[in-house]
Image (cartoon, rainbow, N blue to C red):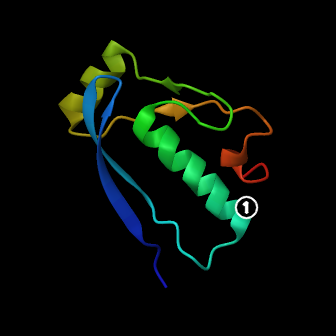
Amino acid sequence: MPPEYDITAADVGGQRAMVIQPSILDDLDPDLKSALAARRVANVTGECPACGARVRWPNRAERRAAARAGRAMTIVFVHEDDCVALCDGD
C-alpha cells in the first residue's frame, strides 16, 4: 500500500508554505506515531515540540537559486539525539 499524505497550508517563518507530510494512520507503531506527530508540528510551526529544535532556513543565495531553478527549498532541523521525532535514531 502506498503511503498517504496530508497537505497543510502554513505560515512558517513569515512565509506561506505548503507542507506535505505523511498521514498518521491508526495501525502504525506507537513510537512511529509519536515521531510523526512531533515532526508534523515542527514542520508547520518551525519548532520541534519535543526537543525545541528550530528550523534552519536557507540563506538568501540558496533561496534565490531555488527560485531560479523552480525548486522547493529544503529546510533543516537539527534535533537533539534523544528527540522522539527521530524515532529511535531514524
Q: Residue at x 63, y 74 (%)?
A: 28
Q: Position of residue 29 (x, y in %)?
A: 70, 71
Q: Residue at x 52, y 66 (%)?
A: 24
Tag 1 residue:
31
Q: Residue at x 52, y 32 (%)?
A: 76
Q: Residue at x 57, y 32 (%)?
A: 77
Q: Quadrant for residue 20, please give it.
A: bottom left
Q: Position of residue 52 (x, y in %)?
A: 63, 28
Q: How many marks?
A: 1
Q: Position of residue 63 (x, y in %)?
A: 30, 23
Q: Quadrant for residue 71, please give it.
A: top left
Above or below 1: residue 73: above
Above or below 89: residue 67: above
67 sits to left or right of 26: left
**Hey, what amino acid is under mark 1?**
Asp
82 sits to left or right of 74: right
Above or below 28: residue 65: above
Along the viewing direction, whichever of 81 and 45 lies nearer the viewer: 45
